[in-house]
Structures are given as structure tokens and as C-alpha cells.
Image: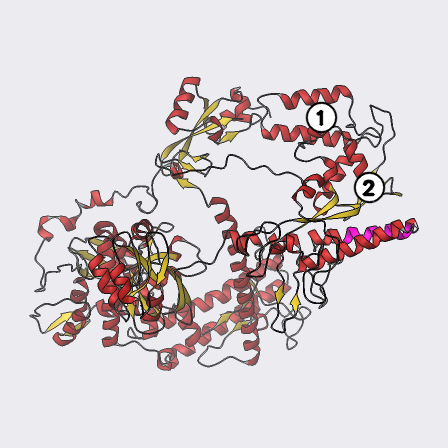
Amino acid sequence: MTKNVLEHELVPKHEILTKTDAKKLLESLGSTLEQLPGITENDPTVKGLNAKPGDVLKITRKSPTAGTAIYYRAVA
Amino acid sequence: MITKKIDSVNFRFTSPEVIRSFSTIKVVTPDTYSEDGFPLEGGLMDLRLGVIDPGLHCKTCGARMTVCPGHFGHIELIRPVIHIGYVKHILILLKATCKECGKILLTPEEIEEYKQLLLKEETTEAAEEMTLQNIKEKSKKVTKCPHCKAKQDDIKLDKPTNFWANESQRLLPSQIRERLERIPDDEVRLLGINPEAARPEWTILTALPVPPVTTRPSLTLETGERSEDDLTHKLVDIIRINQRLSDNISAGAPQLIIEDLWDLLQYHVTTYFYNEQSGIPPARHRTGRALKTLFQRLQGKEGRFRHNLSGKRVNFSARTVISPDPELSAGEVGVPQEIAEILTVPEHVTEHNIKDLKKLIKNTQYPTVNYIIRPDMRKKKITELNRDEVIEELTTGYVVERQLIDGDVVVFNRQPSLHKHSMMTHLVKVLPGKTFRINDAAATPYNADYDGDEMNMHVPQSEEAKTEAKELMSVKKQILSVRHNQPLVVGQHDHVSGAYLLTKEGQEFTKEQTARLLSSIGIKSALGKPKYTGKEIFSMIIPNNMNLEYFSKKLAAGLSPEEAKKQKHDSYIVIRNGKIISGAMDSNSVAGSLLKAVYKQNGPEQAMLYIDRATKLTLESIMITGLTSSLEFYKIPEKTQKEINKVVKDAEKQVDELIKTYTAGKLERSPGKTEKETLEDTIMSVLNEAWKDSERRLEEVLPEDNHALIMARCGSRGNLTNVNQMASVIGQQAVRGKRLLRGYKSKSLPHFKENDISAISRGFIESNFVKGMAPLEYYFASMGGRDALMDKGIQTGVSGYLQRRLINALLDIVVTSDGSVRDSAGNVIQFAYGEDGTSPEKGEGDNAIDLSNYVRGTTVFEREEYREDRDLAVDIEIETEGFEE
């Protein structure tokens, strides 16, 4: 049961944004880290990536209309 | 422009000191007015608590009625009582702290640890909440104080306001207060309470605020009798008991009596705050009506929040019954002159319009001016006496409130406002009569009919509001539903029937009839031919650039594509250069594909024009062709009737056979079902098949010009099932999706044997509506009907509540200029609306972007050889006159 959830086919691709990329993202949105959608640090994907509070995850999802859709979540 | 912005809001408990400092007087007299009707000094209507009589001045601030906000007084409670709103907090505090020293029941090390945890910079609110919860949970279980070693009591709450220690000893409010007072500020913080804003002992009241009289005005009846507010009644009770308690204490009454009175005081104070507490009887008025106290004033649909703050009554609005008027555009609304004379639109006086406005003011009748507003904002009503003076006085900078005239922008609404099409902007058309008039196509999005429906109209007052309403909410811009990507502002019923009757194959009109039809939609043209087909006539209202081919959804129902292409039922529609080559218009054309294509290719204005012309033209044509209902339409040939009877009888026999097989134990189970379930399923499908069979046979024998069939075919109203029920067999009745089995033990009615599961005994109705039902059948039909009715009622309730919850949750979420979806605090919900950042309105079917326009350039119909000239001597010049704003 200790399989890495990130490898499961139903889990979309998660990656940690570099500090500079994260800063750029926030700048382009004109918002603060708190205003991004959150994800708890206990989330299996966060644990799998070894992400820390303050990190921003980039999630690339499959979408029936957009092809791929990109979503960002801040680890809280 | 924001001039002032609220940074934060703080809520705190009111301490007795604060209550006393608010207070202008100490209220001691348990009465309101003296014998001679003058407010008693020190009573609940003391003049220092504010003024509620016009003309009088406040004794505290000196202001007059509407200016003085009223002033608080207070009651000194002789014994402390628990505030009902804080009972839960008191319980937690008592359980978490020591009865002797008031410290939290945790070791000093643990306390220090938690303190550090809460001090940490990066702790989020959620983590903080967790820590606080931990402290409460942990300290609750400790039985011996780690600080002073005192043994702790087991505290129980006997709802609503009694606390017991170790199940036997009653904790009096005064004792509780003493305990709460002992908790040090530092430890209060650890329990998640800011001691500066809320000291624990403030949850036990020693002084009670008396709200100003303006909060509880008394009514004077016609008889001169005064009737006091519920709150005043309650306060009288409190003061009276407080007084009695005080007297008894000073007289040295036994403890038992004092405690009884104390409990009574607690009861009155509790019901003063909240009169629906379970466990205690609600305080009642002399008439037996439960009093409406503080909490009831705020709570629920009729409470202060939902009734007076979230929703308010508004000015510049009107409401009346609606009725249809096909002569109006769907973007217009007919407004009774009576209403137009009362509602006004402010018009700023400038050099450019002053002449016209003066002329308007001069009018003594309808289009005139009701008020003027001077530059100092003073409003003046125009009367016969001052009309000339006002005209003389009028200069730029004034505002004139003129009456509603044709072309004004109004927002029109019908409840329940479930989607954005429930509030749309129309242009005013002032008409005689007393009802609002709308084009029937505009009734569809409002879900309105004319059996007494009333609708509301609102008049935007600023240029900004008018523009916004016009640009965003106009009917013409709301034609397409974002939800279905289908037109919503569409003709129904007779419009659809009319369109079908007009355009069906072989329908021809004489020159005179054609002239009548065309003039109804304002097309003037020289007619060269002696006869015109309906298709030719309808083609005149389709824009020239339309090229479409599609199967009519309704007409082609049940047909194979090959059959349809062969034009069975006129069901394959080909439109080339705005001309109908083949096929007849049905609901899909009037209300679906064609209208949508017109909208997408030619824009809102042209779509609106098409709707207006189509509604008028189809109504005119149905008046020529005629459409009616007659018993004759539901009579079927004897031969067919016999066939259908046989089908039904055969099915019933088949059911009996099945039952025999089942009782013999020879019925084969279907997977996952018991034998009984299998039997039930098979019986249902056998009967249903027979019923469907009768429908097919019926369709074969009904003549093509049967009006009921026509309506079912073109989708205007009803379907073949309805016709079948009237003409041949009504069919199976069901309750909760199952055949009837309710009422008696193992049977549906006393007339049957127990466990009789034949078709007849379980609600299969062989008769039809024309013939009439047998008594038993009639009873079954009523059972099925009642079930359907109940279900409908429950469903609307459930979905309405769901809708409300959703709206409240999504209400302030917007798509911002950068394409992201955010709430009012700027929190990002989505980075692109719906992941793809596209509007569903602009898409087509499952595709986010409609590419058919680009592809269509290559379809056969756009090629050279198909570009022939039109036969009709008319070129459709789309006349926009009268439809532009």
C-alpha cells in the first residue's frame, strides 16, 4: 500500500515550481501566495514530492475541452 | 473611488462596566406609563431613552424624533444570571480550568509547550484552531489540578442553563462567575479567547442593557390604547422579578424561596434573548402568542438579515399582470400608461436639451415631468400651480424627473429568478390598458404564461445603469442560453405549429394570402406569381447568408437517415442562401438550429428581427391554415381498434402465462434479480411493449392532416403518447416507479384476490380517454396521478433549496480581466474559466470553439454552381427600422 500516488494514472502531473517561477506566477496574477488555491502539507502528492509549506505546485491536468489545463496550488 | 475602507471588524463581549457606561439611566420601575399617560421616570419608556413621539425632543441629546438614535439604559441585576448565548463557552471554561486556582488543568511544561506552538510565526489559522482544540480536549480529562493539587469536580450541563458539579451539587451563577473571574488573562488566551475583548466572567450578566425605546416603539391604537412592543413586555417581567428578588433578600427570606425567584429571573433573561430554547416553555403574550424576542428579530427568512438587509423593497419599480402581444418586439415591453405616468427617469438639464425639457414640463398630460431637482438636491413636485414658475426657473444643472416614454430602458423580471434570463432589459412601449404586454417569445425564458402571472419592472436611474442594463441584459443579447448553448427567446406552441403548417410540402398560398402574410411582417413587394409556396414565404425572413442542412429532430424522430433524406415527413431541411430548398420548419427550426445559426452568423440584432418576424408570420399563417382540436381526431377505424384490443388482450394473456410459469417455479431468473423481480420486470416490459405497439398502429392509421398528429410531429405541443392515451390505451399506472401495490394486504383494491399480480389488478388501464375509464381504472389513474403530483412538489422544493445554496456559495465569484476566476477577496478559484478560458455560449456542442464557420466555406452550398438567383421578385432587405434602439 506504500505506492507513490504520483505514479497512479488518475493522479495528474504535479511538480514543484522553482522560487523564481513561483514569484513570476504571483507577479503575473498580481496576487499573494495566500490567494492561490491551497493544498495541505499532508496531501499524499505533497509528501510524495517532498514539498514544503510556501512551495507552489504546478499541476498539469488533462481536460476534455482545453487539452491540457494548468493549475497551481500553494502548499499551506 | 473608495474614500473609506473598513480594515477590520472586532467583536467583543460587553462587560458590566461597558453596559453601565452606555447607560443613561438605571431602570427600576417595572412599568411604562403613569395613569395620566405620561412616561414614568426611571421606567421603560423614560424620556431619556429616546423619543418616539413626533414633535418631542430627547431629554438626553435634545434632538428630534428621526434625528435622535435613542439611548441605552440598564438594569442592575440583583443576582447574576447566565447569558444563554454563552452557555457552551462557560461549560468549556469550567471543564478546562481548576475550581480552586483557576489555572488550566495542564502541567506547567505542557502549558509552556502550547504557548510556544501558538507563538510560532508560520502557524496558520487552521493549525492554531487545532492547538486550541487540543488544549480544551486534554484539560477536560484531568481530575486533579497539577498546580494546586485540588480535586476537580465533574461538571455537567443540564440544559439550558443549569450547571451541576458531580451530579449532585448545583452551581449557582454567582459561583460560576467567581470561578471564571479566577482564570488568569494569560491562560484565557491559551483557551482561544482574547481577555481584553472577552473576559470569561462577562458571560454571566450582572447588568442588563435596556435598548432605546426606538428599538421597541409602542403602538397607539385608534382607541387611544397603547400597545407595547414584545421586548418592553419582557423587560417589565425582568424588572418585576428583579425587584421581588431584591425585596426577598433584604427581608431575609429562606434560601429556597430566593433560589426559586433567582431561577425565575434566569428564565426571563433567557427568554428575553432567545424565546425558542428547547427545554423551557416560550414566554407568551396575554393572547397566548409566543413573544418575539431579540434572537427572533434577527433569525430566519423574516429576520433582520434576510428580510431587511439582504433583501429590500425598492423604488422606481412596478408590478402587474402580464399578457401577450405579438405586435411587440420580443425586446420590448408594453407598459400601461398609468404606470408610465408614475415612474420617472432623471434627465440632466443641459444646453442641448433644455428646450425639449421645458416643452415637456409644459405638458399637462401624459408625457410630462413629475419632479425637478434643484442643484442643491432639493426636490420639487410639479403641480398645475407652479408649472410656469418651474419652466421659468429651469437652467442647466437642474435634474428633471420625466415620465417613462417609449424607448426607455427597463429591467423586467419574473420570480423565481433562477437564471440570468429571469431579469432582462426591455425597451418601453407605452400602451393603453392595465397589464404589461410582452411578445410570446420573451415569455419562454421567464417561464411565464398568462393565467394571471405577474411580473416586476425596474427603471434604471443613472446613465451608467442604463448603459449597463442595455449592453449586458438586453433580450437580444440573452437569446442564447449559456447553459444549453441553445436559443431561449423562442416562439412556442402556435408559433411552431404555424411554422410547420406554413412550410410543409405542398402548402401553397394565393397571391392575396401571400400579401396578407408578408404585410403582417412589414415586407412590401410586388408579387408576380399567382401562387406562392409556404417555403418561399418563410424564406423571406431568413437572412440571405444562411446555408444549413440538418435533420429535423422532431419530424425525423423514429426515421432512419435514408428515410428522412427521402423527405418522409418533410424532415430533411436544406437551406441555401437563406432559401428553404426542402423540409418543413418545426420546433427545432423555430427554436433551435436555425435561430442559433442566424444568431451566430448575423448577430443579436438580426436574430431578434428573425424572432419578431417569425412569431408574427407564423401566427398569421396559422390563422389562414387553421389548427383546432376535435373528437374526430381521436377516433380510429374499427379495424385498428380491434387490432389494438387484440394486442392488449394478447399481452394480458402473455402475463398470465408468465405468472403460471412463475408459480410452477420454471421462470428463468435474469442476472442479479430474484425470480419475483424477474417476473415483475418481464410483466412490465410485456405490457409496455403492447402499449408501444398500439402507439405504432395508431400512427399508421392517423391521417397526415390530423391536427393532434401535426402538433405532436412538429413539436409544438404534446406527443404521440398523449394521442395514444386518448385514442387507444391509457396504459400502466405507477406509484414510485412500480406497478400499483398499495392500500390493502397484498392487493391494490378489495375487488381482487390476494397476490393477484395480473395486469388488471396492478393498474394497467385498457380503456382510453375518449371511451372513458372503468371505475377501478379511474381509481388507479388517480393513484398514479397523485404520486406524480407529490413527486413534482417534492422535486421543486429540493431543487429550489439546492439552487439557493449554490447561489449563496457562488454569488460573488467573477471572471477577472486576466481570465482568472476569483472571489471577492481576490482568492483564485480557477486560473482560466472552466479550465479552457472559453465561453460556452461561443462554442458548439462539445467543442469549446465553433469551427464550423471556417469549414462551411467549403461546403457544397457555398460553391459557385449553387449560387443561383432567387425566384421571388423580392430581395430581402432586412429592415432594421423600429428594432434599433
Question: Start and end of the magenta stretch?
Answer: B256-267
> Is there any visible trace of residue B592 in the rendered image?
no
What residue appears at the point 44 percent right and 55 percent down from the top-left corner? B418
Q: Please give left or right for residue B432 compared with residue B108 in the image.
A: left
Q: Nearer the viewer, residue A51 or B670?
A: A51
Image quarter of residue B629: bottom left
Q: Relative to residue B200, is residue B720 depicted above or below?
A: below
Q: Please name the amino acid that badge 2 sits on.
A: Ser
Q: Chain of mark 2?
A: B
Q: Chain of mark 1?
A: B
Residue B853 forms part of the magenta stretch: no
- Picture quarter with the C terminus of chain B: bottom left
Which residue in the structure is indicated by mark 1? B186
Residue B108 at x, y percent in the picture: 77, 20
Q: Nearer the viewer, residue B71 or B839?
A: B71
Q: Please name the amino acid that badge 1 sits on.
A: Asp
| Circle nearer the N terminus (2, 1) | 2
Assign a secondary structure to mark 2. helix
Q: Please give left or right for residue B207 compared with residue A27 in the image.
A: right
> Are labels 2 and 1 assigned to the same chain?
yes
Q: Main secondary structure of the magenta part?
A: helix
Residue mark closest to the camera, 2 vs 1: 2
Assign a secondary structure to mark 1. helix
Q: How many marks?
A: 2
Residue B790 at x, y percent in the picture: 56, 65
What residue appears at the point 51 percent right and 56 percent down from the top-left corner? B800
Badge 1: residue crowd in 10 Å (few <14, some 14–19, many ≥20) = few
Residue B537 at x, y percent in the picture: 17, 66
> Is there any visible trace of residue B807 in the rendered image?
yes
Image quarter of residue B822: top left
What residue appears at the point 12 percent right and 68 percent down from the top-left corner? B524
Numbered label attached to residue B174 = 2
